[in-house]
Image (cartoon, helix red, strand yellow):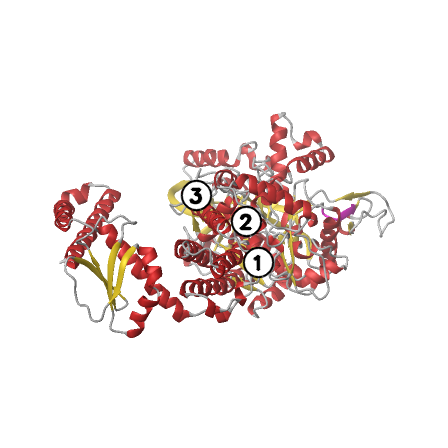
Amino acid sequence: MPELSTRFNFQEVEKKWTRTWLENNIFHAEAQDGKDPYSIVIPPPNVTGILHMGHALNNTLQDIIIRYKRMQGHQTCWMPGTDHAGIATQNVVEKSLAKEGKSRHDLGREELLKRLWDWKQKYGDTIINQLKGLGASCDWPRTRFTMDDGYSQAVKEVFVRLYEKGLIYRGQYIINWCPRCQTALSDEEAEHQEHQGALYHIRYPLKDDKDTFVVVATTRPETMLGDTAVAVNPDDARYKDLIGKTLILPIIEREIPVIADAFVDPEFGTGAVKVTPAHDPNDFAMGQRHNLEFVNIMHPNGVLNENAGDYAGYDRFEAREAIIENLEELKLLDKVDQHSHAVGHCYRCHTVVEPYLSQQWFVKMKPLAGPAIKAVKEGRVKFIPEWWTKVYLNWMENIRDWCISRQIWWGHRIPVWYCRDCPQEDNLIVAKEPPKKCPRCQGTNLTQDEDVLDTWFSSWLWPFATFGWPQNNPDLNFFYPTNSLFTASEIIFFWVARMIMAGLEFMGDIPFTDVYIHGTVRDTQGRKMSKSLGNAIDPLEIIDTYGADALRFSLIINSGQDLYISKEKFEIGRNFANKIWNAARLVMMNTSLDTATLTQGIEELDLNALDLADQWILSKLYSCLAGVEQAIGNYRFSEAENLIYDFFWGHYCDWYLEIIKNRFAQKETQQVAFGVLATSIKMIHPFMPFVTEEIWQHLNLDAACVSVQPWPKGAPTKINKDLEAQMQILLDIVTHIRNVKTEWNIKPNQEIDCYFTARAKDKKQLIEDNAGMLQDLLKIKALKVQDDLKALPNSASGIVDLIKFFVPLGDVIDIAREKERMQTQMTQFTKAQEGLAKRLSNKSFLAKAPQDVVAKEKERLDTLKVKIQEITKTIKNLN
């Protein structure tokens, strides 16, 4: 049997197995009749991206489930790919252009697109390669990109179908506009952040009486230049006589009416609100209801236009300050109150978004949302944890139409052409391919819509477009619908909900059955990891320092609703990988049996030929295996890892391998030790693929990778809880007596005598039957089991499960000297305890000292109390 090296060289092992897996294409799956499919689609990372902790967590979870299902015999397909990420990718390329002193308009559309494709070819696969290094067992030859030719056909097909069904329309509406990116954003892309601003109270003079004012309250005084009315609630008695009157708009001097609208909240501000139909979604609706004029005062870049009068050319926020100053000079600023309110920001560049009147393309969402709501309510799609169901349903039941057009150049261009020879109201052509002529006038003077589609309009098709839809093919029929989706909570609305709607609309079936929403990666202070906070940990740095297995294992074992991570926490994964390696090396060095004997299968071993420790470790193994299967089945991955960690490190390494070290020559011992190791390697593999793959090859069992080995078979008949309880009594006895040795400064290898007594016959029998094991573990020279032994002079004693033990100390230590040492410790601890207690009762100290100092002092006091109790108990037991 080839010997493992003395240390686990994770850098060398990871590179070797990443290369081997890819070269042999072992993760590829084909549609195959008679096979049980299991498929998942990767949330496609942006081509601008590099691996961050969120990616590492998300993809590790996916890899665990796909490796587990592959080993269970499923025909598994994990579909990989990347998203073109329209706004983000174009921003990256435009920033590089800016360094050349150029803008996209200097280059023109075709040249910019060429640069974008060049950038994608050079950097677009960066994160894919990093995921391969993480150990992700995707079906890599299937890798898709949302702007592949075939995928682009699917996008155009969907647009045309929805348009023909009346679910896509074009119209002038208030949309979220990013002045920096100069594009529309969907409601979900305008992230709202709490902002400490001001509420400005402005006087609007009455036309017929310049000394009478209506005071309006606004957070955005710069938009007043586009006001076309002031609105009040029709039931507000304060303003009944003013409804229908005319006001003079300050600064612009435009005449505007006072209108009555039930939308106005009489309790907000003064109860009178300015109406700016071209710059506010609620005002837009009022403008439509009251046939008001729509005055746009702003260029797309956030600079005020000619409709802003003297403020044309001002940036929107500069204009705000100047207008407030002007209003003060005109004595039209009544007052300014501090006001906290939510302000939308672009999800990409974080610029404050502007509600902006624009002609855009929209999808009617209500008809699509209905079936998707029903699918979740009926349980056909399940959210895990279950509480996300309520979040999903709440958003879906209040869904608004989706603005899908973007004023950028990188993306799927909207498949709409306009005939310049036809009347404007009837010049629109929607087609999957460029039309050669206008179907109405037969003219050829056609131009395509300049806009591209929202990135999410392509990614909502991901579960079926990746498998070749709209073409009917074996892959699509076999792997769709997929099984599980792993994602973060922030894209439930962006992506998850829309995929459910698209799957039901275009495939007639749900896209997946389970949606697992994993936690957020946070630092130890509970803050979300981000570059802006400077608290992000680079997973690539962790892989370089500790290894990919360590990163994976540490992330998952610390996961829950959220993850609180520091660099030090990755040591647990590194230490566990080393423990697995060293245990395997120990077993392999002590195994002399031929491979045929070793591989006959531990599940087939005759229990009657095994002693208690062998039976116990088999019972623990199969209990662990059953628990891991149940935990993975319920998406409780942290629980599965904890079960594995406790079993392999705690039971197999710390106890079993120590128990058998003096009887490794026995056939049954080698079979059990080797069989448990081999089974454990398979069980650990989905979580830590690299170290387990390397060890598997050295076990010389099968040339095939462990990645494609069958999952271990359960053996319920080997699970014996009564036997586990008996063994636990013995292990507790060993632990207690080792503690006695520690308390009395007896060296671990120093031999002792030990007496046991118990009233119950089965307890005495347990000690007698396993005397040899106890003697080996505790270095017991003479072990005696006696009836009704109440005490032994000069002995340390203890009780474990009604079994009492005595360790005579007279021959192994100087009792008087040890008592003196303990009494000295007692005096020192007591004195320190009194000092701390006095300090913590001092009101002046408690008032002045920092809270963390007070907390540490209290912790010290609690520790001293425990130590004093332990010493007191030790001396009492001896007496």
Q: Residue at x 62, y 66 (%)?
A: 371
User: The disc labelled 1 sits on which kind of residue?
Assistant: Tyr
Few, some or many residues within 10 Å of mark 3 (<14, 14–19, 20+)? many
Q: Closer to the camera: disc 3 or disc 1? A: 1
Residue 874: percent from the left, percent from the top?
A: 18, 55
- The 10 Å Cα crowd at callout 1, few under 14, some 14 to 19, many 20 or more, is many
Q: Nearer the viewer, mark 2 or mark 1?
A: 2
State how far apart marks 3 and 1 are (Cα).
66 Å
Query: Circle 3 is placed at which residue position?
Result: 202
Q: Are marks 2 and 1 in contact (CB under 8 Å)?
A: no
Q: Is residue 397 left or right of residue 267?
A: right
Q: Is residue 202 above or below residue 376?
A: above
Q: Is residue 215 visible?
A: no
Tell me if residue 158 comes above or below residue 223 in the rendering: below
The magenta span reads: 414-418
Q: Amino acid at mark 2?
A: Ile
The residues bearing labels 2 and 1 have C-alpha atoms spaced at a distance of 18 Å
Image spot of residue 514 (x, y percent)? 57, 62
Specify the amino acid type for callout 3: Ile
> Regarding mark 1 in the picture, which secondary structure is present there?
helix
Report x, y in % for residue 787.
22, 71
Residue 68, which numbered label? 1
Q: Find disc 2 in the rendering and name its residue.
A: 695
The answer to whether 466 is drawn above or below residue 35 in the figure is above
